[in-house]
Image (tube, grey):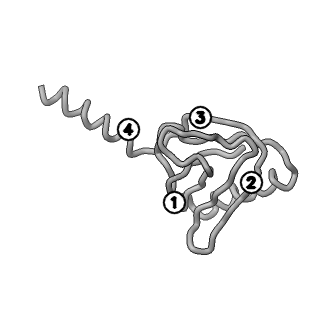
């Protein structure tokens, strides 16, 4: 009995621990914010979501645990799109695994 129940219970808890890339949306970058006291990168789109299952929808966030070089590539892509006013496709977690309380980003393209 434990061989059946234990893996099921553990899989339920492990699902909420890992961030998931499970949704996409496109829009123009409306703002990009960075701060000196953290390595998070915050941004908004012109059609920013007004709701989310668990996170504050005010910002998308590229978290500080992403390696520095990758964060720089993503920031460069954001700033280029902002300057050109081009639409980007954002891949994010819509299931509730937030980054610094806001919507966690997995892809910018």
Q: CA distance from mark 1 to mark 3?
A: 21 Å
The residue at the far left in this view is 1
Q: Which residue has dot 1 on it?
A: 65
Looking at the picture, how far across and down is residue 7, in whole percent?
24, 32
Q: CA distance from mark 3 to mark 2?
A: 18 Å
Question: Which corner quadrant of the image does residue 17 belong to?
Answer: top left
Element at badge 2? helix
Taking the image as shown, residue 24 lies to the left or right of residue 79, namely left
Do the numbered discs 3 and 2 sit on residues whose CB atoms are within 8 Å? no
At label 3, counting other C-alpha atoms closer than 10 Å, the crowd grade (few under 14, some 14-19, many 20 or more) is few
Q: Which residue has dot 3 on it?
A: 23
Q: Which residue has dot 2 on it?
A: 78
Q: Which residue has dot 4 on it?
A: 15
Locate the N terminus by quadrant: top left
At label 1, counting other C-alpha atoms closer than 10 Å, the crowd grade (few under 14, some 14-19, many 20 or more) is few
Dot placed on the residue nearer the N-terminal end, 1 or 4? 4
> How many numbered discs sit on the rendered protein?
4
Do the numbered discs 2 and 1 sit on residues whose CB atoms are within 8 Å? no
Element at badge 3? strand
Taking the image as shown, residue 65 lies to the left or right of residue 18, namely right
């Amino acid at each position: 009995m434990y061989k059946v129940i234990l893996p099921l219970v553990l899989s339920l808890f492990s699902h909420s621990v890992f961030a998931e890339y499970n949704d996409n949306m496109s829009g123009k970058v409306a703002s990009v914010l960075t701060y000196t006291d953290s390595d998070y990168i915050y941004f908004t789109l012109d059609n920013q979501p007004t709701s989310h299952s668990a996170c504050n929808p005010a910002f998308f966030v590229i978290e500080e645990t992403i390696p520095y070089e990758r964060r720089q590539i993503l920031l460069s892509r954001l700033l280029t799109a902002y300057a050109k006013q081009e639409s980007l496709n954002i891949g994010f977690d819509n299931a509730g695994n937030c980054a610094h309380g806001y919507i966690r980003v997995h892809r910018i393209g």
